[in-house]
Image (spheres, rainbow, N blue to C red):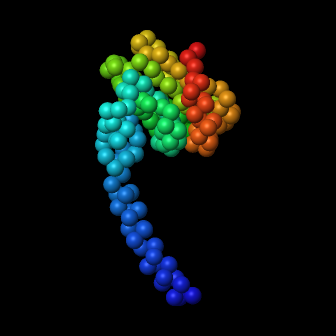
Amino acid sequence: MLHLMKKRESSFAPLLAALQTVSERLVTCGTCGNVDTQDPCAICSDPRRDARSLCVVEEVSDLWALDKSRLFPGKYHVLGGRLSALEGVRPQDLSIDALVARVAAGGIDEVVLAMNATLEGQTTAHYLAERLEGYPVRLTQLAHGLPVGGELDYLDEGTLAQALRARRPVG
Ligand SMILES: [Zn+2]
């Protein structure tokens, strides 16, 4: 038994050390809120990605889920959560001013509001649509067909890809 435990320690030690190194190097992208080993992140600094299209998500995990589908050629903006009266999350608690500033800076044609299909996600999308009103951008949202209560990062890639492909104008 002791022998087995010792063996386990020695085989996991390099792996743990590697994970430790990665986690120490992780930084939050100052532009989009993604988590990466560089700032700006790999997505923001990739010239092949379409800077005219911006996809707004609640959490970094949503960004990763969407990006895995490889259907969205643009860039992202991570809010860092969703508005919630229950949990006391207000607009100023999220990266909303930064989003408006990015849109106001120009060069963006389409903003995809890719919130979760939850009440709070949709409330957040409505709020964002209001805040972005008057800017010359096309606002779209993921197609319904997202299961109600559906959290993006739990959806299979096919469902997510479908919702993205069939995205429609807000309002
Ligand atoms: Zn970034």
Q: Look at 65% across and 26% down and name the residue there.
A: 144
User: Residue 94: which quarter of the image?
Assistant: top left
* Image quadrant containing the N terminus: bottom right
- Where is 110 relative to 92, above or below? above
The vertical placement of 127 against 136, above or below, is below
Expressed as whole percent of the image width and height from the top left, the position of residue 99 reads 40, 27
**Which quarter of the image is occupied by the C terminus?**
top right
Q: Residue at x 53, y 88 (%)?
A: 2
Where's residue 104, x and y in %?
35, 19
Q: Position of residue 110 (x, y in %)?
A: 45, 20
Q: How many marks?
A: 0
Query: Observer-nearest residue: 159 or 140?
Result: 159
The foreground one among 90 and 170 is 170
Q: Residue at x 41, y 14 (%)?
A: 135
Identity of the residue drawn at 35% across and 42% down: 42
The spot of residue 149 in percent (x, y) is 67, 36
Q: Is residue 97 visible?
A: no
Taking the image as drawn, is residue 166 in sight?
yes
